Amino acid sequence: MEFEPVIGLEIHAQLLTDAKIFCGCSSKFGAAPNTHTCPVCLGMPGVLPVLNRKVVEFMMKMALATHCVINRECNFARKNYFYPDLPKGYQISQYAHPPAEHGWVEVELDGGKKRIGITRIHMEEDAGKLMHDEHNPASYVDLNRTGVPLIEIVSEPDIRSAEEAAAYLRCLHEILVYLEICDGNMEEGSFRCDANVSLRQRGTEPFGIRAELKNMNSFRNVQRALEYEIKRQQYVLEGGGQVVQETRLWDDTAGVTHSMRSKEEAHDYRYFPDPDLVPVVIDNAWIEEIRKEQPELPLEKRERFMREYQIPAYDAGVLTATPATASFYEATVASFPTINPKAAKAASNWITGDLMKMLNEDKKDFTASPIPPRAIAELIQIIDDGTISGKMAKDVVEEMYKSGKPPGEIVKEKGLVQITDEGALTKTVAGILEKNPEQVAQYRAGKEKVFGFFIGQVMKATGGKANPQLINDLLKKMLAGDR
């Protein structure tokens, strides 16, 4: 029997507002425990929540970017459950009347593109955080995160593989970061994902019994967890067993999922409208105001880079992975006197190669690059005009990164100007051929690998400063002989 996975993802994105969703406390990460709290977010008696307008605007930005229908009116509800990090005994969320629904995104896969539906996007407050003491039988509660604004993005069960799930997750992550409404930091919990996965016999309509997966804190772990869970469920079904509806935790170290709790039916959260919050009314004028502020999104930018700069799809994907990388690339290309495909591709190579490698090693992004875009453009120009070779440029770019100096200044200081004098190089090549008659005879007898030996000898004799193309041409001409 052939099985087909059916996967749906629930993503929680922490919004980059200065204050929490219903009070004025700071929403910044990393403060000392329980210092970003007040009577409102702690749920003290007699206090009233006041909605942060910026949260609604950020939700609308994501709704427009994912082609959702924005409902003109939505309500907040109380989601009731009891846990030590939930001081009120309920979470303010949205249930029956979400603000946005019926959306979709298009993800890029090896086989092309696929549209994945979005059921709904709604706003809610975050809970606190439990910290468990490894040495004592105690847990501590940090309520700084309580009341931090979230949007929850619920997909349709349109995903059919772990690879598709990872692509969908990356797509939403890119959009959130481009909109500047979420920093996307999975390690700090500002971008979190739960997955529902089930198997059904291929070709049938009814869904199988699903398991919910939690505790996946990276794109790779989401993919690994889903791959494991699909295999686990397949093993159970092929053995004649039945999958249990439950919540399972992903163990990154062991590479397996563990049962956390059974979940025969969905939790009865006893949702009811929050009596302290009035309905949110969104008019057309407000939607259009937000629409005008929307930036160019990653997929649109990738397609434009390929069309405008004539770079390959892979390059465009890497360059548009973050807004900072894309902006750096465009600023580099704009620094050329004229934009042409050769220069645009060279800029891509240097940015996604040497510079990105050095920035990653220092855990920096392109906003903190010690090399400005115009310096990369200058480096490419002095390679093109023959001042230095591509090999020399590797050393130059490392020095640029360390010192912040422009490439022209470094080339002069280190005496790296490439030798392009054909007369001088002809004498050098002739001398090397004269000293190595055995290798000359081998080459002329058809042993072409010896050619690399001569290149190396010329480079050694010139301190690596000889123009490689000129050396190549001279050697071929002078070695032709009686061959």
Image (spheres, helix red, strand yellow):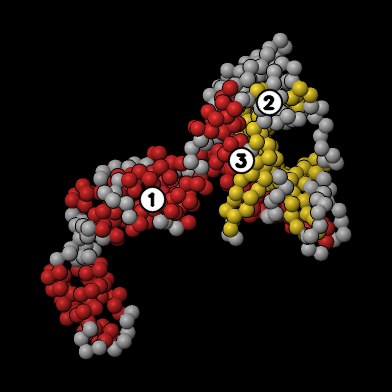
Q: Quadrant of residue 127?
A: top right
Question: Label 2 belongs to which residue?
Answer: 73
Place of residue 108 in the rendered image (x, y in percent of width and height, measured from the top left):
57, 53
N-term mark: 3 or 2:
3
Amino acid type of the residue that numbered disc 3 sits on in the rendered structure = His
Amino acid type of the residue that numbered disc 1 sits on in the rendered structure = Ile
Which residue is painted at 72% across and 47% down in the image? Answer: 157
Q: Quadrant of residue 97?
A: top right
How would you rate the neighbour count of disc 3 (Cα within 10 Å): few for under 14, some for 14-19, many for 20 or more?
some
Position of 443 relative to 111 (above/below):
below
Amino acid type of the residue that numbered disc 2 sits on in the rendered structure = Glu
Question: Label 1 belongs to which residue?
Answer: 351
Query: Hey, which residue is sitting farthest top in the picture?
Result: 46
Q: From the viewer's perspective, is 175 left or right of 383?
A: right
Instruction: Measure the alpha-carbon separation of dots 2 and 1.
Output: 46 Å
Q: SS of the residue at dot 2? A: strand
Q: SS of the residue at dot 3? A: loop
- Report the disc number at residue 184: none
N-term mark: 1 or 3:
3
N-term mark: 2 or 1:
2
Which one is nearer the viewer's eye here, 110 or 236? 110
Q: Is residue 37 visible?
A: no
Residues at marks 1 and 3 touching, judged by CB atoms closer than 8 Å: no
Place of residue 27 in the rendered image (x, y in percent of width and height, measured from the top left):
57, 25
Instruction: Measure the alpha-carbon separation of dots 1 and 3.
Output: 32 Å
Which one is nearer the viewer's eye here, 151 or 116? 116
Quadrant of the rendering where the N terminus is positioned: bottom right
- Report the disc number at residue 67: 3
Which one is nearer the viewer's eye here, 474 or 145? 474
